[in-house]
Image (spheres, grey):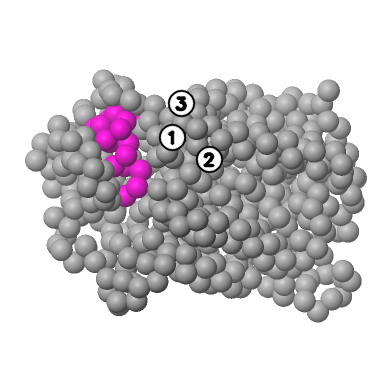
Amino acid sequence: MPANAPHRPATDRLKPDALGVVGILFLVLSAQAPLTGIAGAVPLSVALGNGSGVPAAYVAAGAVVLLFSVGFVAMSRHVVDPGAFYTYIGKGLGRTAGTGSAAVALFAYCTIQAAMYGLYGATVAQLMDVHTGIDLAWWVWALLTMALVQLLGVAGIDTGARVLAVFVIAETGILLAFALVTLVRGGGPEGLGVAAGFAPHSALDGAPGVAVMFAVASMFGFEATAVYGEEARAPARTVPRATYLSITLITAFFALTSWMVISAHGASHATEDAGRALQDGDSSAFVFQPIADRFGAWTGDLLPVLLATSLFAGILAFHNSANRYLFSLGRERRLPHALCALNRRGAPRAAGVVQTAIAVLLVVPFALAGRDPVVTLFSWFSGVAVLAIMLLYFLTSVSVVVFFRRSRLDRRLWNTAVAPALGALGIAGAIWLVLANLTTLIGGDRTTATWLALTIPVVWLLGAAAHLTRPAGPKPVPPAAVTSEAPGTAAATAASRTSTTSLTPETPEKDPP
């Protein structure tokens, strides 16, 4: 496409300096869909996992992800690219592994978004039927929302960040208000239950693996800090700050809120109450009822609306992440180069359309088959997406160690070897827990869980095969390299001149033997 075409900038660069730490933070927190995570995961963790010890599971999951993030951030100082996972993995483990991982990353982001469309469609359909009398199928609302998400996507990342900020503040505001009021008032009928929430014997009670699995799933999306690095102001500073801040806030938020919900029920009654909510088919009541008891019945009308906006925020966040992966793959010529076309606002134009088309293709079959959007679409795709992203976390940790041992760009042992290795071990344990409990996570049978799990290596192999049959070609205009110094390395200045943002022909990288 000519560089002076009227509908795109002169280079294949995303809009620079569009996001600061706060903007990236809201994009990440919206992907977490906090209200969805609390209302959906906490009742399951309490009923099926370790009961009142669930807050400790969030702390443990946050610690593992924080260890992972140390190496992730170290890599982000040298590699800035919207295809963060696959670029990082490619730098350490070779282009074939990187391209296979790109396919898995796209699969994860697109399936989690499709899963959220299922729950979102069902939630909005019920809300509209109850409050307006409009009775339309769930998939109608899902398709209408896809069109709206597409419009917001082409409006630019700064516009999307502002929209998401409103939704994130609304949903987290009421949950934090409930948690803080409950904390100040000394908890529920049995007090705060500090020992029940965080003591080792409580954390290891029941099935702690289930609780840790859901806690790790709640962290899904924090890695988007690096995805937006090319659009960030001073990415070498912005991305690390946003990464550490988002993990800390997410961990603290989920641990505190789950602790206060359990305290409101009473630690000795929480498991029974959560199980009863699941049997009644409305697990969110385990969370919504204590809030209504504290603030009044009006929250019963507000919380379902906030649940819908929470899901919408997550859908938009994953749309932005997925289309930037498509954009990066197009720029690398691993996919058609037309995918890196940008509009006047510097947002991915063609990649956004393709991502929306993928969402349609994933959602429509469930609608045509008449499947329940929550029991099948939401449960199946969210489960397999969590497993896929865990695999990427593990491969990235390994790649960080290999990359820095080979390049010597950063000689800090903790940041480039110890923490990534510990993170890899923790993530490997989380993968084992997800596999062992995948049937529970997807709410289906073992056969379905097995087929879903097998799709991930198949997707990776297809991506790797695509690279072998169509190796990446030269990019017309490679984006600028990171120019800030990486701490702890004497060669930082030279590295800033030689470390590129992606795997370009100017810096060839061979696959490891």
Amino acid type shown at disc 1: Asp
Q: In this picture, is 29 found above or below 124?
A: above
Amino acid type shown at disc 2: Val
- Looking at the image, tell me whether mark 1 or mark 2 is earlier in sequence order: 2
Give the percent coordinates (x, y) of residue 283: 27, 47
Give the percent coordinates (x, y) of residue 121: 43, 62
Decide which of 333, 264 is in the foreground and name it. 333
**Among the 4 quarters of the image, the one containing residue 264:** top left
| Span colored in magenta | 39-57
Amino acid type shown at disc 3: Ala
Q: Residue 384 carries which label?
A: 2
Q: In this picture, is 365 found above or below 380?
A: below
Residue 71 in view in this figure: no
Identify the residue at image location x=81%, y=79%.
Answer: 6
The N terminus appears in which quarter of the rendering? bottom right
As for residue 512 lying within the magenta part, the answer is no
Give the percent coordinates (x, y) of residue 129: 31, 71
Q: Is mark 2 on a helix, strand or loop?
A: helix
Q: Name the residue under label 3.
A: 436
Residue 473 in view in this figure: yes
Identify the residue at image location x=63%, y=71%.
Answer: 154
Q: Name the residue under label 1.
A: 445
**Among the 4 quarters of the image, the one containing residue 60:** top left
- Looking at the image, tell me whether mark 2 or mark 3 is earlier in sequence order: 2
Give the percent coordinates (x, y) of residue 376: 45, 48
As for residue 41 lying within the magenta part, the answer is yes
| C-alpha distance separating marks 1 and 2 | 14 Å
Q: Which of marks 1 and 3 is in front?
A: 1
